[in-house]
Amino acid sequence: MSDAVLRTAGLSKRFGGHAAVSDVDLAVRRGEIHCLIGPNGAGKSTLFKLIVGTHEATAGRIEFLGRDVTASRPYERVRLGMSIKMQAPSVFKELPVLQNLHTALQRHLHGAALAREAERLLDLLDLRADARKPAGALAHGQQQWLEIGMAMALQPTLLLMDEPTAGLSPEETFRTGELIQRLNADGTTVLVVEHDMAFIRQIAQRVTVLHFGKVFSEGGIADVIADPRVAEIYLGKTQHVH
Ligand code: ADP
Ligand code: MG
């Protein structure tokens, strides 16, 4: 699988005696939107944190763009081309939307190039009309989009998101899906941890299903959705509130 941007092998994380993630082999192919799904408590967020480097693996290996990043710090992974949109928005609420984008862009760009890219992102995020508002005055969904835009400002090879639709209305969720599809069409590979099945159906190209910390199944979205065993674990008794 030489076209994998990200690959894990035997990746595991234990918390004391509890195996939150067990022996996970995952491959995210260049150019795809890959969704990591599963019931609450399946280990999705733990796997996400292993990939971005905020958790240290108990065992196994993580390769990004062919390099072993298993022991790399999060910022080193970002420098190699990962960009992360965390679960809770962390925009600068008192700063205008445009300034938020500038803050993220000034790591790479200056002057006219920075201004041009900020304008491009404003359009992409559909936030042009709100460019001068403080980010804190935006609707929750718009703040999530701004946060996605700030992650995109790093021009990542791989954009990683943990439940980007948490707390969003169905309409905002759908528009988030459209935004992710636009970013993907521009060449960004996307890995999304998600629980919402309608959203997964909207955006996913390939899916990995986690259950009790292990890979339960993996494949094209149509096959995974058609698998009655997946519906069973989703609707089954294993769900509980985070
Ligand atoms: P998901 O994101 O799929 O809902 P998580 O990765 O958050 O699942 O959690 C997987 C399991 O690991 C759960 O049983 C959870 O209680 C446990 N867990 C997650 N984080 C920690 C932690 N920091 N310390 C101890 N147990 C944890
Ligand atoms: Mg989670």
Image (cartoon, helix red, strand yellow):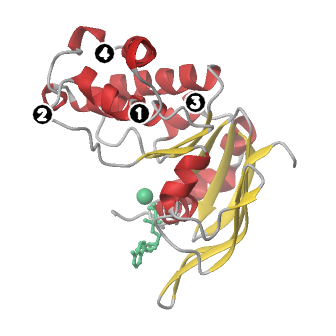
Picture quadrant where residue 19 is located: bottom right
Whether pointer 1 and pointer 4 mark residues with C-beta atoms closer than 8 Å, the reply is no
Q: Which residue is mark 3?
A: 203
Check disc 2 and report the residue beneath it. Answer: 94
Residue at 50% across, 34% down: 198
Q: Residues within 10 Å of mark 4 (few under 14, many from 20)?
A: many
Alpha carbon separation for disc pair 2 and 4: 16 Å
Q: Disc 2 or disc 1, which is closer to the eye?
A: 2
Task: From the image, tell me which residue sits under label 1.
Answer: 148
Q: Which one is earlier in the sequence, the residue at label 3 or at label 4? A: 4
Residue at mark 3 to residue at mark 2: CA–CA distance:
32 Å
Mark 4 lies on residue: 127
Q: Amino acid at mark 4?
A: Leu
Of pointers 2 and 4, the one earlier in the residue sequence:
2
Which element carries disc 3, helix, strand or loop?
A: helix
Assess mark 1: CB under 8 A from ligand 2? no
Instruction: Locate residue 67, reporting x and y percent.
Output: 74, 57
Residue lying furthest right in this view? 1
Q: Earlier in the sequence, mark 3 or mark 2?
A: 2
Secondary structure at numbered mark 4: loop
Q: Residue furthest front?
A: 111
Query: In front: 173, or 52?
Result: 52
- The answer to whether 234 is drawn above or below residue 99 in the figure is below
Tag count: 4
